[in-house]
Structure formats: C-alpha cells, structure tokens
Image (cartoon, coloured by chain):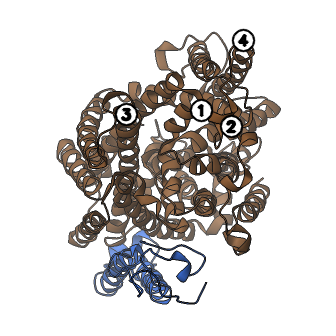
Chain colours: A blue, B brown
C-alpha cells in the first residue's frame, strides 16, 4: 500500500498544477489576503456599524487564509499520483485528481 | 420563484467586490482549461473517465443540488416557516443519500451503465427508457433555464446590470468550461463552488448570529416577534410547512411523502446527482460519494435556513407588519444590511457560484443523456467514440441556447415555470418505485416497467389538478389539500399507483430471461459484482456501510436536538 513499487512507466507522475486542491486553496487564499488587507485599511465607520463594530472582512479573511493553508498542506502531504498503480498512494485511489 | 424587482435592494458594490467576483470567474475558466487536457475519449467527457476520488465526487454530489432553488428557496422557507425547514435536509435528503450509497449505487456502478436511463433500458427495454430519458432531458433544459434566469435577475437586482447582459455572460461562461472539459470541468468547478458558497454564507451566518445575540437571542426575538413562535422553533410536527392541520397526518406526510417518496425519488434516480457518483474510481468510491456528501449536507441548514430565520427578525421588509414580505429576498436583504464591501463581493460570488453550479450540472447531465441515451441508442448507432464526444459538445451548445430561451420565457411567465417544476418533480416518485421494484423483483416485466411509470405519473398529475393551487388555476380544489402537503400526497399516490400497476401487469406478461438480468437484479447478481475485490482491507471510514451508519446516527442526533 505505502510501498512505491515500480510500475509500468517506472516512476511516479505527480499531477502538478492540476490538483483541484491547489485551485481551491489559491482562490480562498487570495480572497483571504484581499479581505484581511481591506479589513485593515478600508473599514470605514459606516461599514463597521452595519455589523455592530465587528470587522467581518478581517476575521473572515483570516479564516480563509487558514483554510487555504490547510488545502496547501494537504496537497503537499498527499500529492496526487497519476494512474497506473492507484494502490501506491494508499488504498484511496486518488488518481488524476 | 419571484425576486423583488425593486431597486431598494441595489447593493453598493465597489471595486474590491468586483475584484473578488472577477477572481472567481478567472478560476472557473482556468479549471475548464486545465480539465481539457484530460479529455481523450467520450467516457472522459461524459463520466470523467470514471477516475475521480470520493471526496471530490461527494462534494460535487451536493454542490450540483446547491443551486438557486436550494439557496434562495431554503433561506426563504427559513424566514417564512423557521426550523421545520430542516426536514428537507434531515428527513429528506440525508436518508435518501445514504440509501443511494448503500443500496442502489452498486446496481448503477456495477452494471457499467453510463446513465440512469441506460439502466432503465437494460432492465425494462426501450419503452420505459424513452419515457425516462425524454422527460429527464426536457426537465434539465427547463431547470437550467430557471437557474440561468435567477442568476441574471440577481445580478440585475444587486448590481443593476441589464437582464440580457448577465444572461449571455453567464451562459457563455458555463458553455465554455463544459465544452472544454466536459464533466470533469463541471465537477471540479462544483467542488470549488461549494467552498466559495460556504465562504460566502458562513461569515454571513456568524455575523447575523452575533447581531441577534446568538441562537438563544434568535429564539427570544422570534418569540417576541411572531405569534406562532412554537411552530417556528420546533421541527415536529411541522404543520406550518406541510399545511396539514392534523399533527399526526402532518408527520406522516413529512416522513412518507417528503422523506420516503419525494426525496428518495429525487436523490436516487435523478441522473444529475447519480452522474457525479458514477464518475468515481471504484464501486466503493461511487458508494461513498453520496455518503460523504451527506455529511456536509447535514450542516448546510445552518448556513442557509439560519440566515433566513435571522433575516426574519432583523430585516424591516420581512417583519410581520410588512405588507407583503418577499421571503425569497431574505438572503439578499441580510447581505445588504450586514456585510461591508469586501465580504459583500465574496457573498455575491457565492450566489453566482451556486446558480452556475446548478445550471452546469443540469447541462452536463443533459448532454450525457442526449448523446448516449437518445442519439446513440436510437438515431446514429455504431459510430466511433470521438463522434459521440462531438455530439456531446454540440448538445452542450444547443442546451445552453435553449436554456437562454427558457430563461427569457421564465422572466415573462414566472408562475408557469414554477408549476412546470412542480410537475417534473412528479416524475421522480414513480421512477423510484419502478427502480426499486425492478432491482429486487426479478419477475417484474418490461411492460410493467413503462406502464407503472406512466400510470404513476398520471396519478400525481390528476391529484394535483384535484388539489388547491398546486398547479395554479389549473387546480380545481376538489380536495382540501394545498401547498407542500398536496405535493407530498400527490407523490405518495404516484408511488402507490406505480407499485400496484407494476404488480398487476407483471402477473399477465412475460418476464425477461434470468440470463439478461445479471447486474440489474439483486438475486441474479453474484455478490462480487457489487463489491470491490479489496473492500475487506479498507479502513472503516472507507467502507460504505460503516460510514453510512455513522451518518445515520449523526442525522438522528440532529433531528432530536431540534425536535
């Protein structure tokens, strides 16, 4: 299961950029960064009043950065291996993600 | 579904909001382009090469359903009825999804059919197949049009763009990513959309709760605002949502009508959903897709119904004193009142994501059924594989154009669209009866298959004509049932009539020989056809039955907590 037996092509292909987790992490992460920055520099008193003085942009932004970090870590720790031998990753056939 | 056409809802979006919305669309198209590299055969285009991991198909499974009707409709129900709305999730969707994963998915995946109608064809032959495939294809075009119309009208209301501008832009975006990447692009985008929707609704809910003083504060405010607070804060017997006054009958209607017939019918036979699971990489992954999906599904009420309930007490336009509160705007009002620029952009992106997910799901299911079930089966057989991928791409283009037409129609005749949608809902109940009978009763004949379907559907239509207001002025009001209650009864009748007719017709017609039914009927299929060879060595959370048991326990706990 965890052993990396040589398969037909003889080496492990990683799915590189097209791992949906990278897309999700990147978009949510960008959202987070924009919100944090805007929450710090762009919060007018009128805007804050809407939500009883909670700086939503800042807090939601921080939350999104954390989620993006989670996706990046997950994608790093369990990279996608392109087909041939799905068993090589785990039991979970995470091929061509 | 009518949204306010007033300019009172115009949101003051600024450049940050537009930046965040634009970012989302860049990613949507990026996924379409990236997925294109993976398409080399028709199975790649229509079923993602049956290679996706279960968490991806599981999230896509619920995301495909997280369209306009779900987000706008369920938050409206939350504002109008309160807690009983959870039945759509905890009695409706979740048990049906678990049932699909444990019981029915092995038939769909194990028999190697490429669509739900194709299963119908192999089990019951062309008559039942045509009934199923054609009604499904038409319904998809209709619903895609409704999603598109809602998307465009949201953009018009919130940002002030002309309806036709956003109609065309949205259609062009969906069209380009599905034509490029086929089902993979649709599914990957659905997964992305799921997270964008959560990123939009979760902060909105949290801030809303903060504003009303937590869940306790919300309950207090509902008690002091509404006279029927008891109905709004307890899920059972849910008489306000069923419109059935007798509590016992109301519970019966919820459990049998909504839970068993309508939801099982929808989730287990609707190819839009099942297609996502069929794109999985193995039988156990296909089974796990709806089961994994059921976990987030359980918690969606908290970010959809709860904001609706909050809007019901904090938004002026929805107060009991308001002349004609338009609950469909609940979420939009709440966004306007609570969210600052920035989060506002994320929230708008989330709504657009949700409507596009719905539309893309309908179109990608339509093009599969059109290409495999109608074109390849009845019109042009035996061509090379690439020909059918091309047919699928053309079908996608045609479907998008028709959806634009439907959307324009919907903008002029909103009521007619609502009734049509109700009507198509009735196709699911008899489908479920026919499938479940056909899967477990080997004697059931081909003739019984289509006669059961047709008579069940007719029964539902007749009952809704006899009821009050279900089909507008077409309903005659002969029986004292209206609203959701009437839909539950109509669906229940469709189910019972389908079973009775199927049994009677089977008694007088010839069954198919056993040899043709392997993989299609439980008793004639070797157990190994329904399981992966390595299933015994999977961890407990990878075994469908055990995972489903955990889901069942969780949903029972949720039901008890909000009793």
Please tell me in which quadrant of the rendered image residue B498 appears.
top right
Q: CA distance from mark 4 to mark 1?
A: 18 Å
**Circles 2, 1 touching at the beta carbon (< 8 Å):** yes
Residue carrying label 1 = B123
Q: Earlier in the sequence, mark 2 or mark 1?
A: 1
Q: Chain of mark 3?
A: B
Q: In the depicted view, which residue is nearer to us: B413 or A44?
A: B413
Please tell me in which quadrant of the rendered image residue B123 appears.
top right
Which mark identifies residue B242?
none
Residue carrying label 4 = B508
Q: Residue shown at 27%/41% (left/top)?
A: B391
Please tell me in which quadrant of the rendered image residue B548 appears.
bottom right
Which mark identifies residue B142?
3
Q: Are marks 4 and 3 on the same chain?
A: yes
Q: Earlier in the sequence, mark 2 or mark 4?
A: 2
Q: Earlier in the sequence, mark 4 or mark 3?
A: 3
Q: Is residue B168 above or below residue B190?
A: above
Q: CA distance from mark 1 to mark 3?
A: 28 Å
Q: CA distance from mark 4 to mark 3?
A: 38 Å
Residue carrying label 2 = B439
The reply, left or right, for residue B200 in relation to residue B86 is: left
**Circles 2, 4 touching at the beta carbon (< 8 Å):** no
- SS label for mark 3: helix
- Residue B397: x percent and y percent? 23, 43
Q: Earlier in the sequence, mark 4 or mark 1?
A: 1
Which mark is in front, 2 or 3?
A: 2
- SS label for mark 4: helix
Q: Chain of mark 2?
A: B
Q: In the depicted view, which residue is nearer to us: B468 or B426?
A: B426
């Amino acid at each position: 299961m965890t052993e990396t037996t040589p398969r037909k092509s003889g080496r492990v292909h990683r799915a590189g950029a097209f791992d949906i987790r990278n897309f999700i992490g990147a978009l949510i992460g960008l959202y987070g960064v924009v919100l944090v920055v805007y929450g710090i520099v762009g919060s007018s008193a009128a805007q804050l009043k809407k939500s009883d003085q909670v700086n939503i942009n800042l807090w939601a932004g921080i939350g999104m950065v954390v989620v993006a970090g989670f996706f990046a870590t997950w994608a790093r720790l369990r990279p996608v291996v392109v087909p041939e031998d799905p068993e090589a990753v785990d039991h979970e056939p995470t091929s061509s993600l | 579904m009518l949204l306010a056409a007033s300019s009172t809802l115009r949101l003051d979006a600024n450049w940050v909001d537009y930046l965040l919305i634009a970012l989302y669309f860049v990613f949507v198209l990026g996924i379409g382009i990236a997925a294109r590299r993976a398409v080399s055969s028709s199975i790649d285009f229509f079923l993602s090469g049956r290679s996706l991991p279960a968490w991806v198909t599981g999230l896509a499974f619920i995301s495909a359903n997280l369209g306009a009707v779900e987000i706008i409709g369920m938050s409206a129900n939350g504002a109008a009825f309160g807690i009983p709305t959870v039945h759509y999730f905890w009695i409706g969707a979740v048990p049906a999804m678990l049932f699909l994963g444990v019981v029915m998915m092995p038939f769909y995946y194990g028999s190697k059919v490429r669509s739900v109608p194709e299963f119908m064809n192999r089990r019951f032959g062309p008559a039942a197949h045509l009934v199923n495939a054609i009604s499904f294809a038409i319904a998809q075009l209709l619903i895609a049009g409704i999603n598109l119309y809602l998307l465009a009208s949201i953009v018009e209301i919130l940002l002030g763009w002309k309806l036709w501008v956003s109609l065309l832009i949205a259609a062009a975006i969906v069209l380009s990513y599905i034509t490029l990447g086929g089902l993979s692009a649709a599914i990957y985008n659905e997964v992305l959309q799921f997270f964008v929707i959560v990123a939009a609704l979760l902060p909105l809910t949290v801030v809303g709760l903060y504003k009303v003083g937590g869940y306790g504060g919300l309950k207090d405010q509902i008690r002091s605002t509404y006279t029927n607070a008891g109905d709004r804060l307890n899920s059972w017997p849910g008489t306000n949502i069923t419109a059935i006054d007798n509590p016992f009958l109301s519970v019966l209607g919820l459990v049998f009508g909504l839970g068993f017939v309508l939801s099982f019918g929808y989730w287990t036979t609707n190819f839009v959903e099942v297609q996502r699971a069929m794109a999985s990489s193995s039988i156990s992954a296909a089974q796990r897709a709806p089961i994994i999906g059921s976990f987030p599904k359980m918690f969606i009420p908290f970010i959809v119904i709860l904001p609706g309930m909050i809007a019901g007490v904090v938004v002026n336009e929805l107060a009991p004193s308001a002349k004609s509160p338009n609950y469909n705007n609940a979420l939009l009002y709440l966004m306007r009142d609570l969210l600052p620029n920035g989060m506002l952009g994320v929230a708008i992106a989330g709504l657009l994501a949700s409507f596009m997910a719905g539309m893309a799901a309908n179109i990608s299911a339509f093009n599969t059924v059109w290409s495999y079930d109608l074109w390849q089966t009845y019109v042009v057989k035996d061509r090379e594989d690439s020909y059918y991928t091309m047919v699928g791409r053309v079908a996608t283009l045609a479907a998008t154009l028709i959806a634009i037409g439907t959307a324009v129609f919907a903008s002029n005749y909103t009521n007619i669209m609502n009734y049509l949608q109700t009507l198509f809902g009735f196709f699911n109940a008899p489908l479920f009866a026919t499938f479940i009978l056909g899967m477990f009763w080997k004697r059931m004949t081909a003739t019984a298959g289509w006669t059961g379907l047709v008579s069940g559907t007719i029964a539902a239509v007749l009952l809704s004509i006899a009821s009050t207001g279900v089909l507008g002025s077409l309903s005659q009001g002969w029986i004292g049932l209206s609203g959701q209650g009437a839909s539950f009864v109509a669906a229940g009748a469709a189910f019972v009539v389908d079973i009775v007719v199927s049994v009677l017709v089977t008694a007088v017609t010839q069954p198919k020989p056993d040899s043709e039914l392997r993989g299609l009927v439980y008793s004639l299929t070797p157990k190994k056809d329904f399981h992966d060879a390595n299933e015994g060595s999977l961890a407990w959370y990878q075994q469908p039955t055990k995972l489903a048991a955990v889901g069942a326990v969780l949903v029972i706990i949720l039901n008890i907590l909000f009793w």
